[in-house]
Image: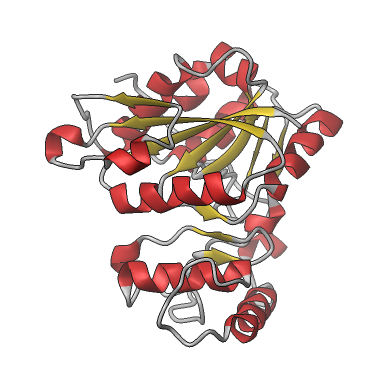
Amino acid sequence: MYKVCVLIRVYNRIEDLKYCIKIIRDTWKLNDYYVLVIANGTNDGYIIDEETKGKIDKLIEIENNIGHYNGNSQLLLEGLKHIPDSCDYTLLLEADTWTYGDELVSTYIGKLQEEGAVWASAQWYNYFLTLATDYVITKTQFIKNEPKVLTFVGPPEYYVARFLKDNNYRFIYIKENMPINLPRYVKKYPFAPTGRFFSFPESKMVTHHVEVVNGGMERKKYDFNVVANTNYFDLSYPKSYSLQHLKLKTAIMLSYLFPYKSWIIKSKDIKIINKPF
């Protein structure tokens, strides 16, 4: 069992946060978790309810939201100050990323140890050197010693990957959360309404932005039941979870047959010019 800080950042996805934390408290049993939430939407009316607050170990609310990418970095950097020293590992988590169970956490902490790596997350695009930042398992001491890895003002997926490479830090891909984005020429595909997957059955995870999914939050709950293959949320949707689970896994497997430039061209680095904010 590991002592793990779950650093959740949130601006306006307050309903997502409520379910994210409920799922953690209900289904994450393999490790000892310290739930730390950093929020910067209070002044804009995004208020965390009292029930959710009761499930959070520490809540930090920032009054000044300095913007999209800047705000993302702002939340992470503020969170670094409050991670307990007793937590050897930290999970960086977006509020809209829900995972049923915590097998993935234990598995990838083990892989970090085995490979001498400091960071584990999915590959965002497979043609560029990129790392997803919505679900990251990392060594706490690393991010505390190297806060620059979280100091970005542009797309973090490019910046983080380049920082790790340029500074000779090892990282590993969380393959259960891949693929994320389909080739750009694919305009319509099952379970990928905007050209990217939001559901990952191998990790029992959903990452929906509810505003782009038909059915909104109720549909997200249904898709979560599908990846979990259980009736976690009691819904009026038809309970054909096993069949939908199989269809989703098949769609993901078949997506690997799409030609990618990376089959013949080595993944490129994108140089991100990063000015401090």
In this view of the protein, can residue 250 be seen by the observer? yes
Q: Position of residue 189 (x, y in %)?
A: 50, 81
Corner quadrant of residue 86: top right
Q: Quadrant of residue 153?
A: top left
Query: Is residue 196 found left or right of 166 in the rendered image?
Result: left
> Looking at the rendering, in which quadrant would you find the C terminus?
top left
Q: Position of residue 184 (x, y in %)?
A: 47, 69
**Is 186 displayed left or right of 245 in the figure?**
left
Give the farthest residue toward the right: 114
Q: Nearer the viewer, residue 57 or 155?
A: 57
Task: Work out whether residue 94 or residue 122 is closer to the camera in this orientation and state it.
Answer: 94
> Image quadrant for the N terminus?
top right
Q: On screen, 275 above or below 91?
A: above
Q: Which residue: 45% across, 16% down?
A: 82
Viewer can see residue 182: no
User: Could you tell me which residue is drawn at 86 percent across and 32 percent down?
Assistant: 114
Q: Residue at x 68, y 42 (%)?
A: 105
Of residue 113 and residue 232, the one placed in the foreground of this image is 232
Picture coordinates of residue 109 (x, y %)?
Answer: 74, 35
Relative side of 35 to 210, left or right:
right
Query: Count of labels shown?
Result: 0
Where does residue 13 sit, x and y in percent of width and height? 30, 49
Above or below — where is 87 with respect to 179? above
Q: Eyeballing the image, is 205 above or below 70?
A: below
Task: Kindly identify the residue that appears in the image at 69 percent across and 25 percent down.
Answer: 169
Q: Image quarter for residue 117?
A: top right
